Image (tube, rainbow, N blue to C red):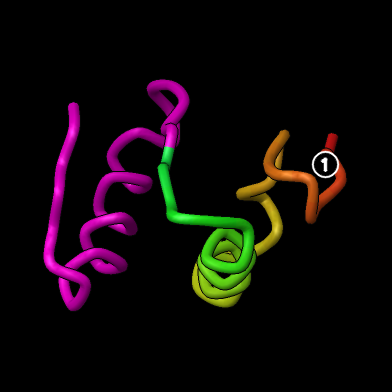
Amino acid sequence: MIEIRPVADRFLRLLEILGQWYEKGKVLIFVKGQAECDNLFRDLLKVRGPFLCRTCCRSCSPVR
């Protein structure tokens, strides 16, 4: 599935997708750069907690 959304709708839609796919498989999210990746990851941690990080971008170490 590929979705292109207005900026205002993206975060809530991402939370919906993560909720649907958490038990089903992996989700790949594309962002413009490392700064946006870091910001998104920080926002996700605030909402969803540290269990999100299994293996992710270099700003985080894998959680087992």
How many numbered marks, from 0 up? 1
Q: Is residue 37 above or below residue 43?
A: above
Magenta stretch contains residue 9: yes
| Image location of residue 30, percent across then percent down | 41, 43
- Residue extending farthest to the top is 25
Q: Is residue 49 above or below residue 22?
A: below
Quarter of the image holding residue 49?
bottom right
| Image location of residue 63, percent across then percent down | 82, 41
Quarter of the image holding residue 62?
top right
Q: Which residues are magenta?
A: 1-28
Kindly identify the residue that appears in the image at 37 percent across and 46 percent down: 18
Kindly identify the residue that appears in the image at 12 percent across and 67 percent down: 6
Kindly identify the residue that appears in the image at 87 percent across and 45 percent down: 61
Quarter of the image holding residue 12?
bottom left
Magenta stretch contains residue 24: yes
Q: Secondary structure at mark 1?
A: loop
Kindly identify the residue that appears in the image at 53 percent across and 74 percent down: 43
6 sits left or right of 23 in the view: left
Q: Is residue 63 above or below residue 35?
A: above
Q: Quadrant of the N terminus?
A: top left
In front here: 32 or 5? 32
| Image location of residue 11, percent across then percent down | 31, 67
48 sits left or right of 19 in the view: right
Q: Quadrant of the C terminus?
A: top right
Mark 1 Cα-neighbour bin, 10 Å: few <14, some 14–19, many ≥20 = few
Q: Which residue is mark 1?
A: 63
Q: Amino acid at mark 1?
A: Val
